[in-house]
Amino acid sequence: MEKIIPTADRLGDVKEYYFSTKLREVAKLRAAGKDIINLGIGSPDLPPAPEVIEALQAAAARPDAHGYQPYAGRPELREAFAGWYHRFFGVSLNPETELLPLIGSKEGIMHISMAFLNPGDEVLVPNPGYPTYRSATELAGGVIRDYRLQEANDWLPDLDALEAQDLSKVKIMWVNYPHMPTGTAVPDGFYEALVGFARRNKILLCNDNPYAFILTDTRQSLLSVPGAREVAIELSSLSKAQNMAGWRVGAIAGAGEYLQSILRFKSNMDSGMFLPVQLAAVKALSLGQEWYDGLNAHYRRRRELAFRIMDALGCQYRKAQVGLFVWARCPEGKDGFAVSDAALYQHDVFLTPGGIFGDEGTHYVRISLCSTEERLAEALDRLSTLP
Ligand SMILES: Cc1ncc(COP(=O)(O)O)c(C=O)c1O
């Protein structure tokens, strides 16, 4: 059928999200009877803490739980985020003005783009990097300027080389360390260098920080750097470290002046977050270090199996990786799409091709740690026979 009106020009080259199409294909293969092991997406399989579920259930039974909620989140939730920031990152934030809860941090990427970009404004986007920075920039009418990350440079941006270019049209720089998909941790002095770069060039740094707690030795916030609040905002998420990906809870932290602009956009898009989800998120934010230690014990064992899968595939990887994935270079002469297709169509194992994160990822593949040790061991078995 032909549509009676065309799709808006705004969609431009923006395609349906990779996992949206690919997981539909995986679902079809499963419906056809194939036992596909999905090592693709970073959706934690482990449950949230029991007290978080109890808080959700108790709140859902309240007769007053079902109405619209405040656009800037419940005060209890903003206070819980402030307490969490203080305990784990040593950063003091005013819960009234410097925290804005989100329905997942992914929506925050769009809100930030809509609140600060005019058509033609340039945005520094990591390549490889989380694909949403790119699509949100395009949808908001911005112009993508890749900053290339390479293994030879430890997957870090070359800030001096960037600064030698004309940055006068750049408004936003997306940064995401611990970095997805390469698993690069935050090196000493890196956040400080970024803040200096942003101040000199009048660029708003948007640090996307969902992996701060996963397999890292120390947790870091860009907002802990002196002077950062003038040039940086930070996204956090309960999807990964609290096992709440489907609940859709995150936050933006930063100076009230930035958050007010974001709220002007966001409050026209949604009508608050379901109260029981907010009260359960308060519980999740109160979890202590032992929660994160327990989680990381699982991920450490799983990472060893993921390394062995990469060995079986003949891929090269660095052992010092953090976050929820293992990232590796394909054998000479193969790219990530070929390795991923062979694994899926010959062995019923889905791995993410690195090229979906930008062309710097073409020769890489990524394994998610969000599967049980049994399933990872089964995937290892199947892939050990890969030609
Ligand atoms: C780098 C990065 N940012 C943001 C997100 C989105 O997280 P959320 O579930 O909070 O929307 C993801 C999810 O995979 C991610 O990898």
Image (tube, rainbow, N blue to C red):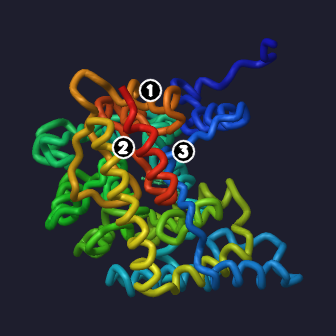
Residue visible at 68% across and 23% down in the picture: 7
- Looking at the rendered structure, the kind of residue marked 2 is Gly
**Residue marked by disc 1:** 342
Place of residue 73 in the rendered image (x, y in percent of width and height, measured from the top left)? 63, 74
Characterize the local packing of mark 3: few (<14), some (14-19) or many (20 or more) Cα atoms within 10 angstroms: many
- Element carrying mark 2: loop
Q: Quadrant of residue 231?
A: bottom left
Of the two numbered discs 2 and 3 on the same chain, state the one appearing first in sequence.
3
**Residue marked by disc 2:** 129
Of the two numbered discs 1 and 2 on the same chain, state the one appearing first in sequence.
2
**Residue marked by disc 3:** 38
- Element carrying mark 3: strand
Q: Quadrant of the C terminus?
A: top left
Place of residue 380 in the rendered image (x, y in percent of width and height, measured from the top left)? 41, 45
Residue visible at 36% across and 41% down in the picture: 123
- Looking at the rendered structure, the kind of residue marked 3 is Asn
Q: Is mark 3 within 8 Å of ligand 1?
A: no
